[in-house]
Amino acid sequence: MPLHPISRAGGLALCLLAACATEPIDRPSLEQVRRRGVFPDVPLDFEVEISSASVSIAPNLDELVRLSLARDPGIAAAFEEWRAALARVPQVGALPDPRLTWAHFLESIETRTGPQQDRVSVAQTFPWFGKLQGRVDVAAKHADALWWNVEARRAAVVLDVHDAYYEYARLGRDIGLTRDNLELLQSLEPVVQRRVQGGGAQAPLLQLQVEIGKLEDQLAGFEAFRPAVAARLLTRIDLEEFGELAWPDLEVPAPLPGDLGSWLREMAEGNPELRGLTEAVAREDARVISADRESLPDVTVGVDWLRTGDARMPGVVGSGDDPFAVSVGVNLPIGRAKYRAIVDEAEAGRASARQKLERRIDELAVALRHARFQHDDAARQIGLYRDTLLPRARQALSVTQAAYGQGGAVLLDVIDRQRALLAFEQAYWRACAELGRSRARIESILGRHRFLDMHEGVTQTTEGSR
């Protein structure tokens, strides 16, 4: 019993699809590894259980960085953009869908073996050798470039957390020092008042009260600024509703070892922005190669089946037999201007990508030199204040206070020495905070905050996952 035409066509289609099937791209391992690196110690829904007790103690810089990385929506957006690009790789590497056609002859075509009534065709187009691989290379390089956008966003978050942390810690030191100095001057006020009551001049008392007022105003300004600075940290980890953040314990950061030449080489190899731009150049190189292949013809292979009825004359050999035909065709890429324009577009894109890479290298080299100067200058200031200026200022204040108690100095001398000591102490902790910030900027430019450098053995790339 002959098969229904649709059934026979379906069988032909299945055979053709089986011959054209390709292995799917396996990427779960890569995606899982990189997801864990982007969102450390956090479930895949990006939720972290945190209570208000987390902000009642001095915040830990490493913990703030971890929570900020886990909760930053920009990192999540960049990660999903990379996943979307990675999902495009198997799409562009797949063959076009086969084409199934059924035709019914409104008037049967009479042949010796019988009238032909229906025709079923199955055709599959095969792009010319190398065209599919070229498209895969472009898509894979694009995904690689977008991965480095994820790394660059992570580095930006780490740098911003360091900057906010040191700003907040320095503000805490400023408030503490100002409060201590205010209390010291306020403790002198009763002494001066007694001297005034004993017949002394009133000018020192007025001058002391003016100095106390200035410190009170400075302290009020620092306190008013505190919520705004703390918000940079709290908003990142969704804890702004818990109110005040405790003061961190600002310590003296250790200077970074290394010379500018080695840092410039490390920057060229490790900075995520430069890595992403380098992958973008590689993508455009692959696009040029792929564009050159677009003018090559595609080959289409097909199978036709014609349903034929029984011959009108009995005894005809082959009566009712269904003929088959095999066809091979190529498209004719005669639009040379179109294909030349495709190549021109790819070459212009490659030139643009290379110019962007060179410009960014120059910009980051300048930023690294500036950060190096700030780093070295802050380290120099720390040594100067710690070893020379602060000890001498404290000694000068102690001597002046003793002399004032014995009548050998005036109150203005005590106020001047106290003001100088406060300025030196604030400058010292400002230099400590600047050293921490400049160190973080240098590490960010060098690419030392990358996930791939923090986990040995994670060397897969989108190309390797194929």
Image (spheres, rainbow, N blue to C red):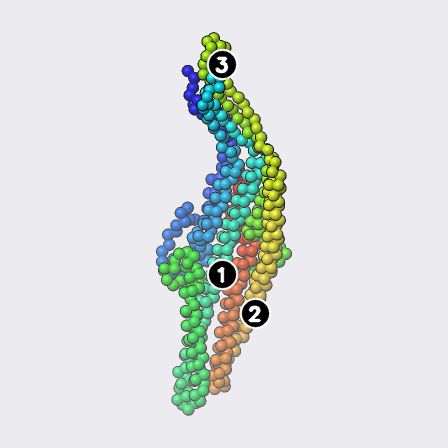
Residue of label 3:
113
Q: Earlier in the sequence, mark 1 or mark 2?
A: 1
- Specify the quadrant of the image occupied by residue 3: top left
Residue with the mark numbered 1? 163
Residue at 43% of width from left, 24% of height from top? 6
Relative image position of residue 101 (x, y in whole percent):
47, 27
The secondary element bearing badge 1 is classed as helix
Q: Indicate the position of residue 29 as horizontal and vertical percent values.
A: 48, 40
Compared across the picture, whether 428 is left or right of 50 comes to right
Which residue of the protein is positioned furthest toward the top in this rendering? Answer: 315
Q: Tag 2: residue type?
A: Leu
From this view, report whether residue 12 is shown above or below residue 172: above
C-alpha distance separating marks 3 and 1? 88 Å
The residue positioned 56% from the left and 69% from the top of the image is 384
Residue 105 in the image, given as x and y percentages of width and height: 46, 23
Q: The residue under label 1 is which amino acid type? A: Asp
Q: Which one is in front in this view, the residue at disc 3 or the one at disc 1?
A: 3
Q: Residues within 10 Å of mark 1 (few under 14, many from 20)?
A: many
Label 2 vs label 3: CA separation?
108 Å
**Residue at the spot x=41%, y=82% of the render?**
189
